[in-house]
Amino acid sequence: MTGSTLRAGLHYPRSVGELQAWFATDEDCLDYLDWLRWPEGFVCPRCENAGGWAVADGRYKCAVCGARTSVTAGTLFDRRRTPLTVWFTACWMFAAQTNGISALSLQRLLEIGSYPTAWALLHRLRSVLVRPGRDRLTGTVEVDETYFGGEEPGLRGGRQKGKKVLVGVAVERREPKGFGRCRMAILADGSADSLHPFVTANVEPGATVVTDGSSGCKGIDALGYVHEPHSRRAASEAGEDVGALLPGVHRVASLAKRWYLGTYQGRFDDAHLQSYLDEFSFRFNRRRSRSRGLAFYRVLELAVDHDPVRYRQLVANPRPKPAPPTPPADGGHPPSLDRPRADRPWRAA
Ligand SMILES: [Zn+2]
């Protein structure tokens, strides 16, 4: 469904109170996922025919091929062990809070049994955020590289100590001022072999690409773009502000680093940096949306359209960081969240 046909309070919850009233049980959550996955009614994922009926075990039986399919089979929620009510609350905290949430905070807030469970849950949500090749940047797009990690993030050249990772940044410029959407990806190095695939994956052909004219940027015009190199040397010789050549890249890179260090308390995790870059881009690209619930809806919509993500894929080489020390539990359970049932407004819409 497109943004204009979606209504707060009908298609997605407006507030955490509404979230809790709508999704009081796993059954409510399952019905919402059913509606997101098959808004026009059940379509068999095996033979792609529409039509079927609910059978006693809660699955659908295809009217054509007879295959049985559950609502969550083949989605991000496939074979889950965490209750859907916890998934939905976690998704709200992840999507509806401006800066997101760390695994440790999530574990404490929802009394999730182990840190790795909370950590994996957030990484599964992160993994749905970017669909490669879709929604590429358009218009005038600044492209440059920056370093993450090391002692002085953002310093150009090989002057930092410690581990650092080169990241490609692309940002749309808006006229007369301001910036549109951004994309970021880890690069092997600053060569054309690394930078060119980054540009073609993230910028729509025909766009104007503004760069600093470094050697890795040469040849961008041959890829179907209008290339506008702004040489740093020429700018400094002309007495211009070199830092202002690519203001969008500069702004996005510094916001991303500040967000990363603030939300994750400086626990720099280069093994999973790409998924954090995707999470930042998702937030940045929705920074003007006043509706928190819409981001929650978008994440779930992407999740029912996404393949399952297994734990071994998340931890495949290297492992997640060990859990930080956990404060002693007070032993008590949180007060009940029971409240009057809402009557599934998304169905009445
Ligand atoms: Zn079928």
Image: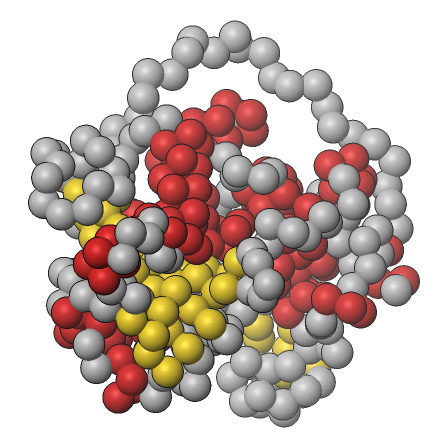
Viewer-side residue, 38 vs 317: 317
Q: Is residue 293 above or below residue 298?
A: above
For the C terminus, which image quadrant? bottom right
Left or right: residue 42 versus residue 271 is right
Instruction: Report x, y in % for residue 302.
Output: 55, 64
For the N terminus, which image quadrant? bottom right
Instruction: Report x, y in % for residue 197.
Output: 26, 75
The figure's colour scheme reads secondary structure
Left or right: residue 281 versus residue 346 is left
Residue positioned 77% across, 48% down in the render: 13
Residue positioned 26% across, 88% down in the render: 222
Left or right: residue 229 versus residue 117 is left
**Corner quadrant of residue 257:** top left
Instruction: Report x, y in % for residue 344.
Output: 84, 54
**Corner quadrant of residue 144:** bottom left
Viewer-side residue, 283 vs 310: 283
